[in-house]
Amino acid sequence: MKLFFTDSDFQCQGVSRPDIPFLCDAEMELVQAPNEFLRHIAIVKGRTRAPNTWRTYGNDLYEYFAFLEANEYAWDSVNQQHLAAWRDAMLERGCSRSTVNQRLRCIHRFYEWAAQHGRTHALPFDFEDISVPKPAGLLAHVDASGGRFSANELTVPTHKPVPPFLHMGQAIRFLDAMTPHSLKLMGYLALLTGMRRQEIVGLDYRVVPNPAGRDTGKQIPMVLDPALTPTKGSKRRFVMVPYDLAVALWEYFNTIWPKLNAIYESKHGVESTRLFLSAYGEELSVRYLNNQFSRVSTKTKIKCHPHMLRHTYGTYELLRISEKEGRSKALLWVRDRMGHSSISNTEIYVHTADLVQNDDIDGYQLEILHALKNGAQQTQG
């Protein structure tokens, strides 16, 4: 079994459709049913518009159909015991329980789609009623489920781990060790705005706010327009950029970026709209950012990946706003700044906030911005 992705030459209804995953078997023949489902996910279904989501579906279906192919099972004649064997094989390989459950849910959706479209007449899944005790949360008063829901019997119990984050002193030491200056700025964006990796490496210079004439004591909203900058689910949102960080980004754009873009333009014949480019004038990838964080982790002995700085922002920002507005308003604020689709995703920071002393919160942004200014001065010197 092989997983491939369409390029810009692939068209559907006269429209170019790149990045859609599709499967081929060992004989390099297209596997019809999962490929039709993947096209449905990418082209028809309105809630799955992001290529990263398509890739996840493609990878999950690849894992399942590779298992079927290796054991010579037909997808439309398996039963719950076959699926349990696949689940157990993934667990034995060291896959996390959350990953296993995600794949099971994907395959469940595939079989539901197949049944709805007449591809099969039976679902190899059973369900059980699960009772989950829920703490009194922000929206508990509108939850009529009583903590009960139907769960696929094949899924395994999981617990939601506390998201890894850095205490502020560690985060500042880590960022101080980052080079070149563009990488350092990407780190500060993650720590001070909670932006995701793909949003940072794909940041379009046209959305970066000009700090001229702005109030130096206020943060500046920066709109992340999915038509310009990739966002999760292609949803438009905005983040708040501290004034000093906006100044640092604007100075970089006017002094360093033109030189890097000139190299890019000489290679490709067009200007790049990406704010961050490599020393060789190339656009950056999430893999580049991950690799650079790994390098700095080795250098500083502080284990950190880009998403940890996003978690750090969520933790400290929740505490900062909670002290001013209370926990409920703080959750809504952080939810919107981080682009969460549900308040339940934001509530994980309640647990990390319990691990931070309140005196660490006083002026945490000022402490970060002071380090940013010192780093900029050293770079210019």
Image (cartoon, rainbow, N blue to C red):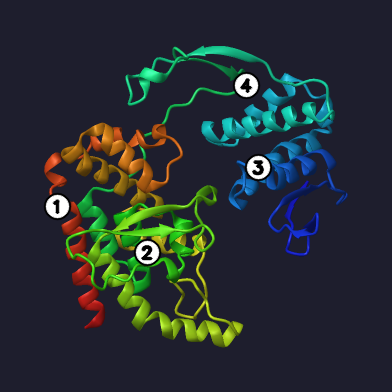
Q: Distance from label 3 to label 1 (Cα)?
A: 43 Å
Mark closer to the chain start, 4 or 2: 4
Q: Distance from label 3 to label 2 (Cα)?
A: 29 Å
> Pointer 1: what residue?
363
Is 162 situated above or below 200?
Answer: above
Q: Secondary structure at mark 1?
A: loop
Q: Distance from label 4 to label 2 (Cα)?
A: 41 Å
Which residue occupies 34% across, 71% down?
179
As drawn, the label of residue 186 is: 2
Q: Distance from label 4 to label 3 (Cα)?
A: 19 Å
Relative to residue 14, is residue 45 drawn left or right? left
> Pointer 3: what residue?
57
Q: Distance from label 1 to label 2 (Cα)?
A: 21 Å
**For mark 2, does the 10 Å Cα neighbourhood hold few (<14), some (14 to 19), or many (20 or more) residues?**
many
Residue type at mark 4 is Leu
Check contact, mark 1 vs mark 4: CB within 8 A.
no
x, y (%) of residue 372?
A: 23, 66
Q: Secondary structure at mark 3?
A: helix
Is 253 situated above or below 98?
Answer: below
x, y (%) of residue 343?
A: 39, 34
Q: Quadrant of the C terminus?
A: bottom left
- Asked whether the viewer can see residue 263, the reply is yes
Which residue occupies 40% across, 15% down?
133
Q: Distance from label 1 to label 4 (Cα)?
A: 48 Å
- Asked whether the viewer can see residue 305, the reply is no
Mark closer to the chain start, 1 or 4: 4
Mark closer to the chain start, 4 or 3: 3
> Pointer 4: what residue?
154
Number of marks present in the image shown? 4
